[in-house]
Image (cartoon, rainbow, N blue to C red):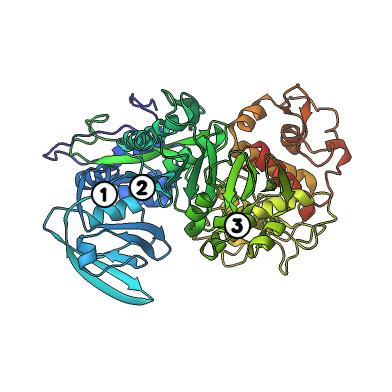
Amino acid sequence: MNKIVLRRAGAAVLALSLLALPTQALTVEQARTLLEDYYIDPVSPEVLNQPTIEAMLKALGDPYTQYFTAEEYAQFLASMEDSNIVGVGIVATACEEGLLLSEVLDNSPAQAGGLQAGDILTQVDDNHTAGVPLDTITTWIQGKEGTEVTLHYLRDGEAHSVTLTRTPIVIPATDTTLVDGHIGLITCTTFGSDTARHMKEGLTEYAEQADHWIVDLRSNGGGLTQAAVDSVGLFAGAKTVGYLRDGEGEYYIYKSTGEAQTQKPLLILSDSYTASSSELFSKATGDLGCGIVIGERTYGKGVAQMLMDESSFPDYFADGSAMKITTDRFFSASGATNDVVGVIPDLLVPADLADEVARLLSAGAPEGDTAGYYRVDLKESWYIDSSLAAQPEWADALSALLSALPATAKVWQGAGGEEWTAVSPETLAQKTGVTIEDRSFTDTQDSPYDLAIDLLATYGMVSGIGGGSFDPEGTLTRAQLCSLLAQALNCHMPEGESAFSDVPMDSWYGPAVNALAKMGLVSGLGDGTFRPDQGVDHEQFFSIMGRLAQYLNLTFYEEIKEAPEEVQPGLEGYSDWAQDEVWLLSMSQKGYLGNNLNLLWDAPEDIAPQDVTTREEAAALLYQVLLYTEVLPD
């Protein structure tokens, strides 16, 4: 079937005008055509043959592909701007039970009704919020001025409800203030068409006073891709920001334009609800050398949607409705995707301490005398005022900072003049009276892969077997490998029936196995079974990790297409089905001087293909893959 011609601006086409009088709603056949033609992956007949659009989208299982009525679409567009909206005045993020209220705006209906930050919104009128996309819940809460909405919520485990009257509310999407007299703090709640302009205004207003910039993207669920790209340009200048790849393997390049508005150090704050365009901004600024990310691993929405409405499909959406379809995967300037895996912060700290950690690191560079300062070398040099670090109210932030430092970071204490003395994080902790969370393991010191294991642990990507142990020489079963990779990738665990007859979903490994199978990284044995207790030999492991590398970075995705047809020297002992991935990991990558880069822990001919993989071997290759795919901070 030929695709309907559609002009594309990035991954989204937005209509700013809606027809007032509905004429015809989208039909099931039209929705089927759009999914067949534009969805990023092949859509199964089971999905396409559903009798209604609602059933079709539910069977698809993609929370980002949605249908909007005309009213819902108008509210969706309004939710991304800092203009007047009609609602009740709450700021919330998704949680397991529904929505967690993070802020109740002053002089709002929600404040008058007694709602508080920390309340969990479980129901809007008759609509339950658990598992529902934030965009959809927003359309339920907002509405016409003067109309009522009933919110059901939990506070300290007790159920409450309140009926509120919707009123016009202005919520600025981007706001800039000066903190501690010298730090420019940009708080951005969404990336809308006004975001880059507001950021530029803030950068200009405080250009002389701010010597550091903090961009707070905690709970920012995304917005317009181009708005994030334009915002990156304010810090990076005219650069390639990232790439989109559609289902046919075609690429679209995102580039920022204009000159950078500041050269001052940048720190970005993230949490588990930082998603989509916010992840684009976080990853791009890091890739382009603008700054570092502090906080929690981001959500992992590395796919982009196309908005289809009356302006692009007048025959389909003449009633003012619209459809949002996942059409592309996003890759950063370095070629890495954040899909599923998220953006890994340079400093993994609790989200509620991220702002204080950033402020600790934002002391100005000492002029003439280093005494009274600490220095942290992490991508660039960051300075800490020792008198501030010694204050009790900053102890939690300093502890989080020191606990999060990777082994590759360097810590220094000012020795007077221009001199610095190297110190360990433990020594600095003793000097300041704070404790450090030791994220390393007690039994890996003698492992040749100790550094790789500890770095993965620092970034929260592996866990041990309990009691502080990792069991480096223990062998891996197929179930254990899936559990290890699912944690490292931060997989969103599926529900429902298992794809394998011998993998119960209520087992400790069931969700992990099915999550990796859904990503195409593991498969069964062709008879409906997975054999979870079977050991994973080296060539099986290399095959899985080769597929993972292709998923995580477009360089590996393209390189596998060049895999030689003839057997390469050193790969003769490997099965035919494994040789392409072994070649990809051990022979495809080149250094700056054209030298071969082998990601395996040894030359492939010196590794026995059928020997069972150990935990330390798995960690060693996982670290290399995550490093060379640019997923891990370097």
Q: Residue furthest bottom?
A: 158
Please name the residue that numbered disc 2 is placed on: 189
Instruction: Kindly identify which numbered label has been placed on residue 102.
Output: none
Q: Is residue 44 among the parts visible in the rendering?
A: no
Question: What secondary structure is found at the residue carrying circle 2?
Answer: loop
Please name the residue that numbered disc 1 is placed on: 171
Q: Give 439 or 383, whichever is nearer the viewer.
A: 383
* Residue at point 34%, 68% (across, down): 119
* Residue at point 54%, 65% (across, down): 392
Q: Give 172 or 150, whichever is nearer the viewer.
A: 172
Other residues around mark 2 within 10 Å, as few (<14) / some (14–19) / many (≥20)? many
In the rendered image, the vertical position of residue 92 relative to residue 14, given as above or below: below
Please name the residue that numbered disc 3 is placed on: 512
Question: What secondary structure is found at the residue carrying circle 1?
Answer: loop
* Residue at point 58%, 39% (across, down): 367
Task: Check disc 3 and give the amino acid type.
Answer: Ala
On screen, residue 250 versus residue 116, left or right, reads right
Residue 241 at x, y percent in the picture = 49, 30
**Split into 4 quadrants, where in the image is the C terminus?**
top right
Q: Give 31 or 475, whichever is nearer the viewer.
A: 475
**Viewer-nearest of labels 1 and 3?**
1
Question: What secondary structure is found at the residue carrying circle 3?
Answer: helix
Q: Is residue 470 among the parts visible in the rendering?
A: yes
In the rendered image, the vertical position of residue 620 relative to residue 469, given as above or below: above
Residue 546 at x, y percent in the picture = 68, 39
Task: Check disc 1 and give the amino acid type.
Answer: Ile
Q: Earlier in the sequence, mark 2 or mark 3?
A: 2
On screen, residue 401 versus residue 275, left or right, reads right
**Split into 4 quadrants, where in the image is the N terminus?**
top left
2 and 1 marks in contact (CB < 8 Å): yes
